Image: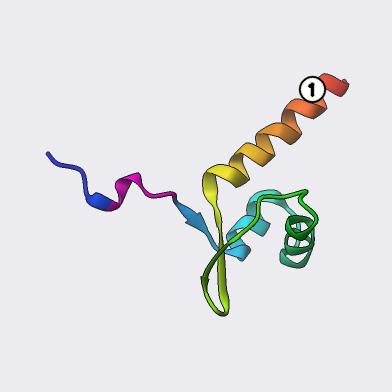
């Protein structure tokens, strides 16, 4: 079976999903992204953004790894 053309594109999370995944507020995620402390969102339209799921998951993995190193 042939894969759909969009299977290779990054999967996106809306700000609410990113906030739920990280347990941080949408406002804090936006501020952290602006300061380079969180993955920058993709501007989909003039008023709509989304985060790349793989980047958010990698950011979480880094936090977990940092905790394990510090312990």
Quarter of the N terminus within the rendering: top left
Q: Is 47 rendered above or below residue 2?
A: below
Instruction: Give me the residue at 61% from left, 59% from top.
Output: 41
Q: Is 5 rendered above or below residue 43?
A: above
Judging from the image, the colouring scheme is rainbow
User: What span is in magenta?
Assistant: 6-10
Occupied quadrant, residue 50: bottom right
Q: Position of residue 39 (x, y in %)?
A: 66, 50
Occupied quadrant, residue 49: bottom right
Q: Position of residue 15 (x, y in %)?
A: 62, 64
Instruction: Give me the residue at 78% from left, 56% from top.
Output: 32
Q: Is residue 33 left or right of residue 9?
A: right
Q: Position of residue 23 (x, y in %)?
A: 73, 53
- Residue that label 1 marks: 68
Q: Position of residue 6 (x, y in %)?
A: 29, 52
Quarter of the C terminus within the rendering: top right
Main structural element of the magenta stretch: helix, strand or loop?
Answer: helix
Instruction: Give me the residue at 75% from left, 35% from top.
Output: 63
Q: Is residue 7 magenta?
A: yes
Q: Is residue 18 left or right of residue 24?
A: left
Instruction: Give me the residue at 79% from left, 28% from top.
Output: 66
Q: Residues within 10 Å of mark 1 (few under 14, many from 20)?
A: few
Q: Is 38 rendered above or below residue 67?
A: below
């Amino acid at each position: 079976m042939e894969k759909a053309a969009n299977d290779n594109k990054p999967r996106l999370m809306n700000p609410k999903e990113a906030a739920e995944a990280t347990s941080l507020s949408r406002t804090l995620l936006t501020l952290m992204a602006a300061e380079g402390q969180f993955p920058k969102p993709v501007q989909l339209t003039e008023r709509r953004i989304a985060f790349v799921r793989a980047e958010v998951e990698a950011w979480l993995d880094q936090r977990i790894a940092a905790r394990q190193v510090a312990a």
